[in-house]
Image (tube, rainbow, N blue to C red):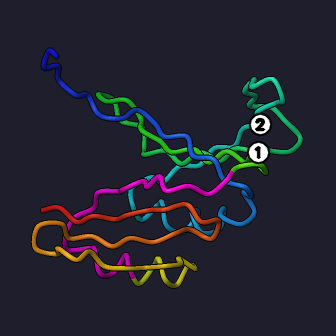
Amino acid sequence: MSGSEFFGFDHIDCRVRSLAAVESFYDELLPRLGLTEKRYAYIDSNGGWHREFDTYNVIEYYEPEHPTKPRRFIGFIEDPLHRKNDTRIAFRVPLASLSALAEVAMQLGAEQLAWSDAMESHPAFFFEDPAGTRLEIIGRA
């Protein structure tokens, strides 16, 4: 296998059973992680994306526009048939903000919050959003 440079992730699409169950949670949490802009979309039954719609079934949270780099984002797509699984999404934050963000997560309704067993080497906490999506916030210097 050839060693190629990793350019990072462009975006993450995450399925949830109900946007109503998680939208206010992410409206409060994600801006604190740097994803300060929000967009809506609609995906039809054929998988077509629409930016003009009567009702939405997708919410996307973007980092601010920057002249020299692409905008990363995470999107939550409503899928009433989605089954909870063990996939986890980890967000990187400054180490100094870790404890405050854990408090915020709990105030917003995070469930199953647990701290890392290896805080020296892996300073993080793990939790679930109100729909059961597994998340992690890890502090890095």
Which residue is farthest top?
A: 2
Q: Going 67% across and 53% down the picture, which residue do you hit?
A: 83
Q: Which numbered disc flags the more N-terminal residue, 1 or 2?
A: 2
Three-letter code, disc 2: Tyr
Tell me if residue 98 is in the magenta stretch. Answer: yes
Residue span colored magenta: 83-102
Q: Which residue is mark 2?
A: 42
Q: Where is residue 58? Give x, y as percent.
A: 70, 44
Quadrant of residue 92 in the image? bottom left
Quadrant of residue 46 in the image? top right
Give above or below for 42 relative to 68: below
Tell me if residue 100 is in the magenta stretch. Answer: yes
In-image side of 97 versus 108 (left or right)? left
Of 84 and 24, the residue lying toward us: 84
- Which quadrant holds the C terminus? bottom left
Which residue is farthest right?
A: 54
Q: Local crowd at mark 2 within 10 Å, few (<14), some, or many (≥20)?
A: many
- Which quadrant holds the N terminus? top left
Label 2: element kind: strand
Q: Going 47% across and 52% down the picture, which residue do you hit?
A: 87
Q: Going 76% across and 33% down the picture, which residue do you hit?
A: 43
Give above or below for 81 relative to 95: above
Of 32 and 8, the residue lying toward us: 8
What number is the disc on residue 114? none
Q: Where is residue 44? Give x, y as percent.
A: 82, 30
Give above or below for 139 relative to 88: below
What number is the disc on residue 57? 1
Q: Report, in whole angstroms, how far the alpha carbon at label 1 lies from the one at label 2.
A: 5 Å
Q: Where is residue 78? Give x, y as percent.
A: 73, 48
